[in-house]
Amino acid sequence: MADHKPLLTSLKEHPWRYLLILIILGLAAYLLVPQITTLEHSWSVVQSLTWYAVALAVVAQVLSYLGGGFMMQAILDVDEQKLSIGEGALITMASYSIGMVAGGWFGGAAATYRWVRRESHDGNSAALAGTLPALLNIGALVGVSMIGTLYLILVHDLSKAQLIEYGIVLLVLGLMTASVLTALHFSEAGTRLAVWLAGRWAALRRQPFTPQKTITLVGQFVFAWNSMRNGKWLRPMIGAIANTGFDMLTLYFLFVAAGHNVSLGILFAGYGLPLILGKMAFLFPGGIGVIEESMVAFYDSLQVPNATSVVVILGYRLFSFWLPTLLGFAAAAFLSAKLSGTKRDQA
């Protein structure tokens, strides 16, 4: 019993810590229950967290969503439409939550279109706002991943197997980027390729395939890409970089809170690649499980203590995914009620 006195004393002195600790450890138990020894060590990491750094992680995540709001504002500003950064952040959060339960990217884009159309009364602006953020955010993630992977290859002391592995990852990311840019430039050929790939993917999953959906999606991306020419992409891209950068800073501050000094190169590599894997894992909404497991594996291979990475990554997912998703449903209800009120006033 003597071993538990410091824990009980700490919790009595700071009862507000119960919720955060229980959520983090609950997620850890759900995702990583086979690693019982690691979880025992993770509890000691939770006890020793530097809480001002945890607070900075929360602030960074708020700034990340404001970066998304700025990106939305900058996209609408291209067509001289007005939207506040705060409302843009609400729409970003709400559309992500809607996409989680209703149609993935299509559902989120449709919700964004509907809410922005109410504000701007312009279909083209609303279509851009629904389509372009995903394109810019994925571009920012690919950039982060390529920087991190290149850092590991050039600077970090890698084994031969790891060198080959990360070299392949860098090559695949480069080919993906080149393919997307080529497809956007040659839209007809890109559309045919996308339809063929989507058809093969549907056949593998033994699901019905509607080519028109893929054609519409590619058409929306091409329209968004063409609308951002002549330097118009710069301000929205700054928003995407802010969105990704502050999200990554959330993860960094949690490493600081756990007392582990992680270099920027390792942070980049362990952040970008798992999130891209999560976006590619269509069967898992929000990359649930995929992102957590792959992040732990990445940081473990880069000599980050496993007990530390478990707490840090589950804390990061709490702040960047679980809480924003719940708040996003509340934001969606608010925006929908506002839209209904507007329609009644117009009637």
Image (tube, rainbow, N blue to C red):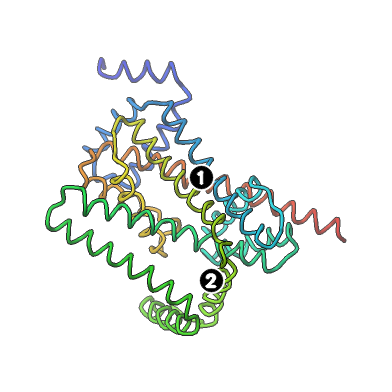
User: How many other residues sit within 10 Å of disc 2, few (<14), some (14-19) or many (≥20)?
Assistant: many
Q: Nearer the viewer, residue 177 or 113?
A: 177
For the N terminus, the quadrant is top left
Q: Residue at x 62, y 48 (%)?
A: 90
> Does 101 sit left or right of 163 as displayed?
right
User: Measured from the top left, where is residue 222 in percent x and y?
Assistant: 54, 74
The secondary structure type at the circle numbered 1 is helix
Q: Position of residue 64 (x, y in %)?
A: 51, 45
Assign a secondary structure to mark 2: helix
Q: Looking at the image, is 59 positioned above or below residue 179?
A: above
Residue 133, labelled with which disc?
none
Where does residue 314 sit, x and y in percent of width and height? 37, 42
Label 2 sits on what residue type? Phe
Q: Quadrant of residue 300?
A: top left
Q: Nearer the viewer, residue 285 or 195?
A: 195
- Residue 192, above or below 324: below
Q: Residue at x 39, y 35 (%)?
A: 253
Q: Quadrant of the C terminus?
A: bottom right
Q: Residue at x 22, y 62 (%)?
A: 167
* Label tally: 2
Nearest to the observer: residue 100 or residue 3? 100
Q: Looking at the image, is 268 positioned above or below residue 179?
A: above
Using the image, determine if residue 183 lies above or below residue 30: below
Displayed quadrant of residue 166: bottom left
Residue at 54% in and 82% down: 212
The amino acid marked with disc number 1 is Ser
Camera-side residue: 227 or 290? 227
Residue position marked by numbered label 2 in the rendering: 221
Residue that badge 1 annotates: 64
Sequence order check: which comes first, mark 1 or mark 2? 1
Q: Is residue 191 left or right of residue 232?
A: left
Q: CA distance from mark 1 to mark 2?
A: 23 Å
